[in-house]
Amino acid sequence: MKNFITLFACFFILQTQAQNYTPTSGNLAARTAFQDRKFGMFIHWGASSVLGDGEWVMENHGIQAKDYKKLIKLFNPINFDAAKWVSTAKGAGMKYIVFITRHHDGFSNWDTKYSDWKITNTPYKQDPLKMLAAECKKQGIELGLYYSTLDWSRNDYPYETGRTGQKAGRTEKSNYASYLQFMKNQLTELLTNYGSISCIWFDGHWDQTNPEGAADRSSRVDWKYDEIYSLIHKLQPNCMIGNNHHLDPIKGEDFQMFEQDLPGQNNAGLNFQSTSALPLESCITMNDSWGFRITDHHYKTFNEIIRTLVGAAGRNTNLLLNVGPMPNGEIGKEFTDTLALVGKWTKQFGHTVYGTRGGPMHAEKWGVTTQDAKHVYLHLFEKPSSDTILIPGNYKTAIVTILNTGANITGKLVNNGIEIYAPGLVFNVPSTVLQISKN
């Protein structure tokens, strides 16, 4: 009875902490710092890369778990170089990395004690997360960790009610209490053994809901996020929690993400949620795939990436831009060459993005604004339909600087802002950047 009372008390405390979650001052500071960084690298990688058909290859090809797990003998990323990965991100102007620790196939990309289906049991034998964490610390890059709540290979995951994983060959009855404890054990490892972690980036909730856009999006299982989120905030109070559930934020979450779209857009058919007051992030691929797909050559251009980065910043949002390294551990030239060009742009214009918030003008197809304490920045992608552009606000001078050339032009101060004569501008690729001084 005494043990039961103790367990009940612990459960009650965890529930209360999550339901009444109040972020610490350190967590609030982490949110502000997160918004200041604006630009990060997402890394989708694991045993699935061996098959060269994306991270969903197990599900898409109906491969049973017993066959899929043979990849543990084939995955050998001998060319993995944490320093190169981090320097590639840093050179592009990225301020943080989010690394896949465990995707939906259940493969763990670190030396976990709680699963044999892990990278240290491959011929590679090493722990890439340990090396990546050390290199991020060395190069001054923040590290966040993606963690899937969905698992196509474990029998205790509640696959019976899931939308995916039905072809994995599982026949045993699931046991969510066991699976929950497994996740808690792994999350404890990740938040104990690898230094300071900026965020835990959850994914997979949608497996237990009706498709996006359906009237009923309630979960078919009780994930017990109160327990999971409380554990994370207990282990590292400043660690932010985000969940790619495609729903409005749940109590205990510290930032909100959008998949393959900027907030307010739904071109991908995934983002029906409203935009919250939490820090925002859009995760977007550089080609059409998250994980390595050998036949996917549909890479975004340098211009597209810059306009996406600036478009995110103009919407007060971070851009988490994805790369899918090859099974040998290398990030392909299709990614690195473009990211090097992005880095040249961020060196020149990064101050118009980093540390800014969304500007006074609503985002338009032809441009967006960002702002910091002293300036408003107008990023023009193309000539607007109107001859004059009105930037709302109070300004101390009508002089506007074109940052691409250093030249000044004279706008017109009006009661509600400043007007800029559009036909007098030269439009550059990927954008013409104007700087206006605030009062």
Image (cartoon, rainbow, N blue to C red):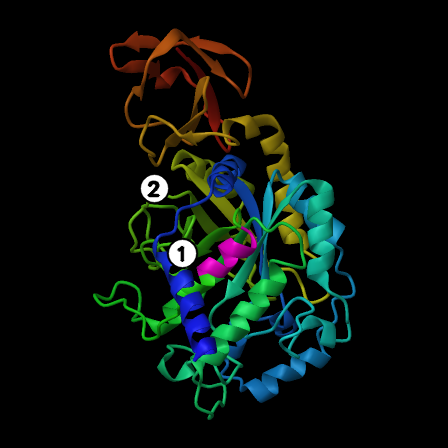
Q: Residue at x 34, y 57 (%)?
A: 19
Residue 64, horizontal then vertical, whole percent: 53, 87
Circle 1 Cα neighbour tier, 10 Å, few/some/many (<14 / 14–19 / ≥20): some
Q: Is residue 121 above or below residue 83?
A: below
Q: Residue at x 34, y 26 (%)?
A: 360
Q: Amino acid at mark 2?
A: Ala
Residue 388, horizontal then vertical, whole percent: 30, 18
Mark positioned earlier in the residue sequence (2 or 1)? 1
Q: Quadrant of residue 328?
A: bottom right
Foreground residue, 245 or 294? 245
Per the image, the residue denoted by label 1 is: 17
Q: Amino acid at mark 1?
A: Gln
Per the image, the residue denoted by label 2 is: 277
Magenta extent = 229-236
Q: Is residue 103 above or below residue 132?
A: below
Residue 128 belongs to magenta span: no
